Image: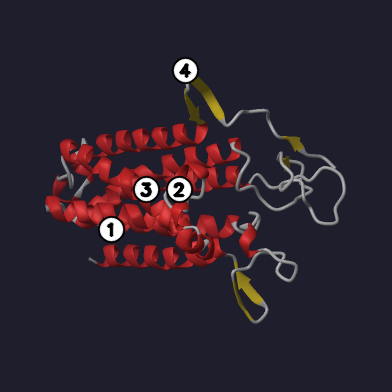
Amino acid sequence: MSYIPFPDISPEIFTLSLGGFSFSLRWYALAYIAGLLLGWWVVRRAIGCPKLWPADTPPMTAEQVERLLTWVILGVVLGGRLGFVLFYEPGYYLSHPGQILQVWQGGMSFHGGFLGVVAATWIFSARERAPKLSVADMMALAVPPGLFFGRIANFINAELWGRPTNLPWGVAFPGEAAQECGQLTGVCARHPSQLYEAGLEGILLFALIWLLILRRHWLKWPGAICGVFIAGYGVSRFLVEFVRQPDAQFVSEGNPLGLAWQIGGYGLTQGQALSLPMVAVGLWLIGRARRA
């Protein structure tokens, strides 16, 4: 079977040791930093072009954007962690509440992080008396670069890989769990679903958003670009879930596909179930903005 060997990349970029203290910079942490900084830069460029916005007036000043960044970081970290706890392993963390805040052990949910950012942005906008829907559009510009870097970091960490495949671009991820392919023998190649998501949620969605802004002037309709992002992410994640390995807690002998929600002969993974409401909300926001 043709496959691509996993590149030998350490999850740690470098490690510094001083006496009994040790510090490691991991690719995942760098992805968060790069995503936040690039998103901040994109937003700064967008608010620096008043003609893109309703009444030729950006929703925030550069100083307000810098203050908002702190709120967004808190929303991402707290929302992402609590989302993972509530959506994916509530039983385990109810039995081990001391581990809920141990984010360095892994376990973050995009859907939870998204809700955390929504809450943080909404509260900040209310405090600053900024137009909430235009601020939401502004935030939608910043997220796809962060998603791109985050998914690349997932690939480097050899986590969140896809289902087994015999396609020539299947990747043989390291680790006993990744090499467990049921009754199949030999090397287990899997879909590099992290790279699929990086392309769809990061590159393609970012390009679509800016095409609509520059060619169709969609920032003039508050809420429209936010709707495009929400629906676009939901569709992208829903599609990738067909080839993404489901979370282990949903997989069993009687449920090898890891379907979290089943009705009759049909079912959805947890990621698909959480993405469908995003598609509905996104389409509603687009329709609402275009009718205004």
The residue beneath circle 3 is 76
Q: Are marks 2 and 1 in contact (CB under 8 Å)?
A: no
Q: CA distance from mark 1 to mark 3?
A: 21 Å
In the image, which disc is placed on residue 223? 1
Q: CA distance from mark 2 to mark 3?
A: 20 Å
Q: Which numbered disc, 2 or 3, marks the residue that appears first in the sequence?
A: 3
Q: Are marks 1 and 3 in contact (CB under 8 Å)?
A: no
Q: Secondary structure at mark 3?
A: helix
Question: Horizontal and vertical percent for residue 86?
Answer: 46, 63
The residue beneath circle 4 is 19
Q: Which numbered disc, 2 or 1, marks the residue that appears first in the sequence?
A: 2
Q: Secondary structure at mark 2?
A: helix
Kind of residue at badge 3: Val
Q: CA distance from mark 2 to mark 1?
A: 16 Å
Residue at the bottom extreme of this rendering: 264
Kind of residue at badge 4: Gly
